[in-house]
Amino acid sequence: MIQLVPRQSASNTWQIATPLLAVLATMITGGLLFAIMGHNPVAAIRTIFWDPLFGMASSYSRPQLLVKAAPLILIASGLAIGFRAGIWNIGAEGQYIMGAITGAAVALALYPLEAWWLFPAMVAAGLAGGWAWGMIPALLRNWFGASEILVSLMLVYVAQRIAAWMAFGPMRNPQGMGFPGSRNLQQYPSASNPELIAGTGAHWGVVAAAFAVLATWFLMSRHIRGFHVRAAGTAPRAARFAGVRPAVLVAFCLGLSGALAGAAGLFEVAGPAGQITDRIGVGYGFTAIIVAFLGRLHPVGILLAGLLLALTYIGGELAQLTMGLPAASVQVFQGMLLFFLLGFDLLTRYQIRRRITA
Amino acid sequence: MAEPTVFRAEGIGKSYPGVRANDDVSFAVRPGEIHALLGENGAGKSTLVKMIYGLVRPDEGRMFLLDAPHAPHDPRAARAAGVAMVFQHFSLFDALTVAENIALGMENPPPRRELAARITQVSHDFGLPLNPARRIVTLSAGERQRVEIIRCLLQNPRLLIMDEPTSVLTPQEAELLFATLRKLAEAGTAILYISHKLEEIRAHCDRATILRHGRVVESCDPRAHSARDLAAMMVGGQMRQIDRSGRQAGEVLLEVRGLSMPAPDAEGTALKDIALTLRAGEILGIGGVAGNGQEELLAALSGEVASRPGTVTLVAADLSAKGPEPRRVAGLLAAPEDRLGHAAVPDFSLIENTLLTAGARKGLVRRGLIDHAAARDYALAVIRDFDVRTPGPHVAARALSGGNLQKFVIGREVMQSPRVLVVNQPTWGVDAGAAAAVRQSLLDLARRGAGVIVISQDLDELLELSDRFCALNEGRLSPPVPTEGLTLDRIGLMLGGAHGMEEARI
C-alpha cells in the first residue's frame, strides 16, 4: 500500500523539481492529446517549445517572447506577494484592463499635445487605475468581510464591459470612420511605448517587469514588510502578534498587485496593442496566476515561468498556423501546466512511502 | 501469579526513528486501583497508553487484559476488550447536545430516550452531574470532560485510561473528579492515571509507575514518598531549587484601568472592567481555568487588540491605542500561550523568528531593512543563554520540541530586557527541567527591575513565582492578594468557576 507521510519541513529539492516535472508531464500529456487528434506529437511539441526560439520564423517570434512575457511577469510579481500572504487576487485581468483605460484616457484627453511628461503621466494613471480597481475588493473585504476571490474575479467582467463601452463610446476614434476602438497610440509619439532596441521586442514594459522582479525580490527577502507578508501567509496569528494589521495588509497586497497589473495594461495599450478595443484584455491577468505558482511565488522563478508561458503563447500561435492545431490548445496547455504543478506540489509537503501491510 | 491483575504489560518496547519511546516496560494494574503513570513530557507515557488503546502497536513485549492476551489492532478492538480512554483534548461537537455526542461515539447507540435515561443514571451513580439535553458549547471544560467520562463509562470498561485530566479543571472540579474515580475504583474498574502533577498523585493514587526516557525507573506507593522524591525519580536527579531572593517592589510600571472588551468571536470571552497595577521587580500571577479571558487579556496587553484610551498605561505613556510594535519599543513585551502559530511561525527558522518581536529593540531591523547577520547572532545568543536544544539557528521552529521552543520564545523576549513582560502559560506542556529554567529566567528578569505578569493554569507555578495573585474568571479579574500564606483552597474559591458544584454536593 502507498502512504503519504507529511514532511517535517517543505523539501527544497522538490520546490525546484516540481515545476520542472510539471512542465515535463504537460509536454507528455499534451503530446498524447495531439496524437489522439491526429497530429505528430513530437512535431507539435517541437513547434510550440522549440521553433519560436530557434525555428525558421524565429526572427519574427523571438522578440514576441519579451513582448508577451513582460506583462505576465509584471502582473505575476504583484500577485505573488498577495498569494504569499494568503490574499487571493484573481482579478488581475480586470485591473489590467482598467489600467489600460485610465492610462490611455490621459493620452486621449490631451491629444494631440506633445510633451515629454505625457508618457510618465500615463504610466502613473495606469498604476492608479489598476490600484483603484484592486482596492475595491480590498475595501469590501475589510469593511464587510466579502471574499476578495469572488469580488476581484467578478470585477473582471465589469472591466470588460467598461472597455467595450469605451471602445464603442467615449473613447472611439473620431477619425476612425465609425469603427470601434480608440485612436492608435502607436501613432502618437509622446504617448507611444515603442520598441527600445530594434529587434528585441523590449519596450518600457519589459524594463518595468525587470524592475518589478528586482524590487519584489528585495521586498520579500530584505524588507520587514516582506517578512510580515510571508508570516501572515503561514501563521496569521503570529503575524498579528508581530504587529501586522490584517486590514492594512489586505489593502497593501491588493493595491500593489492591482497597480502592477494596471501598469502592464498601460504598457500594452500604448505599445503592442496600440488602442483601446473591446478585446484589450487577452488573458494575461489569468495566465499570470499560473506564472506566479509555476515560479513558486519567487521573483526569479516568476521570471523564468513568465518566459515559459510566453513561449506557449507564441508556440501555440505558430502551431495553429503551421499545423492547424485548434486555438484552444494553448489554453489546454496552460491549464494542464497548473494542474500538474498543483498535483506534484504534494511532493514538497509529503513523502510517498510504501507500507507493507500484514 | 500471586494476585489478580486487570492489566499487565511485560517487556513492552517501541521505537520511532531516532527515538526509543518505550524500552522493556513492565507493570501491572490491579482491580480497584488508581494507578498513576508518572513522567516528564517525552518520557514515553503517551506512547505506552496509545499501545494499550490500540492506536500504536508495540515492537516487542506482551500485554494482558484480565489475563487474556491483549493486542488490539485499533481503538475499536481495544474498546471491545474493555479499555476506555479519556483524552486530554476533547473530541466533541460543539453544536450538538451531550446525548448526541455520546451517541456518535457508540457502536450501537440505543434509542434517544433510553440513552438519555442511561446518561442520567450513570451521571447520578458516579456523581457527575450532567444534563443530556444541553449543547456542548454551553459547557465548561470540567463539564465537557464529564461528557467524555460518561461516554467511556457507558461501555462498562474494565480499564479506564485518563490522560492528564485535571489540567483543565479548577481544584474543586478536580476534587469532584477524584471522588468519581474513587467510586469507579471501588466498583472494580482499574484506572490508569497519567499526570505530572505530583501532589494530586500523592493524594489520590494507590500506586505509581514512574517512567524516564521510556523505561520504568520505579514502581511505588506515591503516598510513601515526598513530592520532591517523586520529582527526583522523574527527572533523574535533584530538582533545581528556585531562587526567589533579591527582589524589591519599586515604582509602578504598568497600570491597567477599566479595561473592557467585547468577545472577539463566538468562542472568545469578553473582558470586563479589568484593573491591575504592576510594580518594578514584581511578579503578578493571574490564575484561572483556560477560556476565562486569558488569551484576550494577553492580546489586550500585547497590543494585538487596541482598547479605549487610558486603559493601558506604561509609566505615564498611554499605550491603549498602540499596536504591538510601538508597545515593544516602549518596553511592554508579551509571550502568548500558543507557541506554534502565535508566539512563533512554525515554518520559519529560529533566525527568522527573532524578527517577529526583536526587530526594533535589538536593532535587527533598521528603517525596514532586515539585518540577517544580526538576527542570526541574536538567535544564537538566545539558543546559548537559554539552553535551547537545536541543531542550529536555521532549523524551523516546528522541528523543536515544545519545551525547547518555549525556552526560545521566552528567551527571545527576556533578552530584550523588557520593562514589563506578560507571559501566558509559560510552562504548559514543558518538561520539568525546562519549566524550572523558564521560571528562573522570569524571576531573574524581575530581580533586574522588570515587572512580570504570569498568566497560568498551574497553581503551583503561580504560588512559586508570584508576589501577588489574582484570579481571572469569565473575563473578570479579582483584586490581588499577597501570595504569602495563600492556600490552594482559598485560590479555588477565588477562581470560583467550579461549575455544577452545588448540584454535585447533593
Image (cartoon, rainbow, N blue to C red):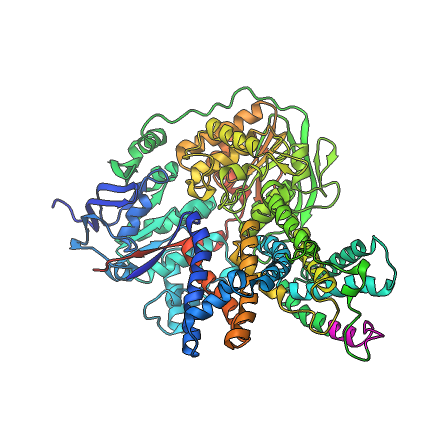
Residue B489 is left or right of residue A204, and the answer is left
Magenta stretch contains residue B462: no
Tell me residue A323's x, y (percent). Answer: 50, 75
Between A348 and A37, the residue placed more toward the observer is: A37
Residue B119 is left or right of residue B74, and the answer is right
Residue B503 is left or right of residue A150, and the answer is left
Question: How many dots with numbers?
Answer: 0
The residue drawn where x is 81% and y is 64% is A105
Query: Does residue A74 sit above or below A183 in this rendering?
Result: above
Tell me residue B462's x, y (percent). Answer: 51, 34
- Residues in magenta? A162-176
The residue drawn where x is 58% and y is 56% is A83
Quarter location, residue A127 = bottom right
Between A300 and B420, the residue placed more toward the observer is: A300
Residue A274 visible, this orientation: yes
Extreme residue in the left direction: B1
